Image (cartoon, helix red, strand yellow):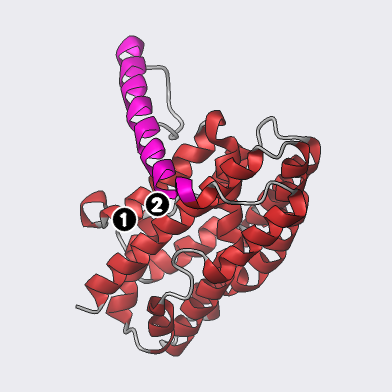
Amino acid sequence: MRLEPGFPAHDWRGALARDQAMACEEAEFLEALRVEVAAEAACVPRDPAGFVRWFEALEINGPGQGDPLFDWLATEADVEQFRWFMTQEAAGEAGFDDLVALAQIKMPVRPKLELARNYWDEMGRGNRKGMHGPMLDALVERLALTPEIDTTVWESLCLANAMTAMATSRRHAFHAVGALGAIELTAPGRAAKVAQGLRRLAFTGRERHYFELHAVLDVKHSEAWNAEVIEPLVAEDPDRALAIAEGALIRLHCGARCFERYRQHLWS
C-alpha cells in the first residue's frame, strides 16, 4: 500500500498517522533482524579489498547457500510442487528494479552509475520484451498462480518486507546495497537449478527465460556490483562495511528461512 501510486487522501492526517505507526513497526522489525546478524557482521574487514573478499565468500559459506531444495527442484519436483514453490517466490518478489531505483538516491557518483546500469538491464535497456519483471510474470501466468497473503508462508513475506524496508529507508541505504548485492552474488546458482527443473518439465524457453537469464547475467552484475558499488563505498568510509555486511546477512538469513520452510512443506 505504501509504495502503490495513488492520490491525496481526504483524511490525510489519519493516513499520516497510520504511516507513522507502520514506520515504527517496520523500524522495530529491521532492528530485530540486525540483532540477529550483529555478531557475525561485527567481524568483517573494514578495508575495501578485504571486505570484498569477505563479501564474495558469502556465495559459498553464506546462510542458505547450497540448500538441497534446489537440487531437488532441478531433478525431482513435479509441476504441482513447482506451482507451490513459484507461488511463494512470486508473493515474496519485491521488485529488484524498484529496489535498486530506491537505493541509488544520493549515492556517490561511481556507485550510482553502476546502480543505474543495473537498473537499465532490469528494464530491458528500454525494450519492453527485455524487462525482467514481465519475464517472471509470464511464468506466473503459465502456472496460473494467484499469490495471496493468506496462502503465503510468513518467511516469504518477511523476505519481501525486509528488502522493501531497507531500500525505502535512507537510514538503511547501505544495508540495501548489501542486501541487493547478496542477491546478485547468490542468485545465479539457484536460478540455474530452477531453470533445469522447468526444462525437465517441458516448459517453453519463454517460460524459462527469467531464470535462464539470471543464471548468466547476474554473474556479471555481481562482479560489477562488488567492484563499482561496494568497494568504492567502503573505500570512502570504512564504517559502511558494517551496514553493507548486515544488509547482506539479513537477506541471506531471510532466504535461508524460506528454503527451510519450503522443504518442510514440499517434502512432508
Image coordinates for residue 126, horizontal then vertical, percent = 70, 51
Q: Are marks 1 and 2 in contact (CB under 8 Å)?
A: yes
Image coordinates for residue 110, horizontal then vertical, percent = 80, 42
Helix, strand or loop status at disc 2: helix
Vertical order, 236 against 125 (above or below): above
Helix, strand or loop status at disc 1: helix
The quadrant of the image that shows the N terminus is top left
Hey, what amino acid is under mark 2? Leu
- The reply to whether the magenta stretch includes residue 12 is yes
Q: Place residue 198 in its image quadrant.
A: bottom left
Q: Place residue 162 in its image quadrant.
A: top left
Tell me if 114 is positioned left or right of 119 in this view.
right
Image coordinates for residue 104, horizontal then vertical, percent = 66, 38
- Residue beneath disc 2: 159
In magenta, the rendered stretch is: 11-39
Hey, what amino acid is under mark 1? Glu
**Mark 1 closeness class: few <14, some 14–19, many ≥20 residues within 10 Å:** many
* Residue located 26% across and 50% down the image: 149
- The reply to whether the magenta stretch includes residue 175 is no
* Residue located 38% across and 27% down the image: 23
Image coordinates for residue 213, horizontal then vertical, percent = 61, 70
* Residue located 55% across and 79% down the image: 205
Q: Place residue 73 in its image quadrant.
A: bottom left
- Residue beneath disc 1: 155
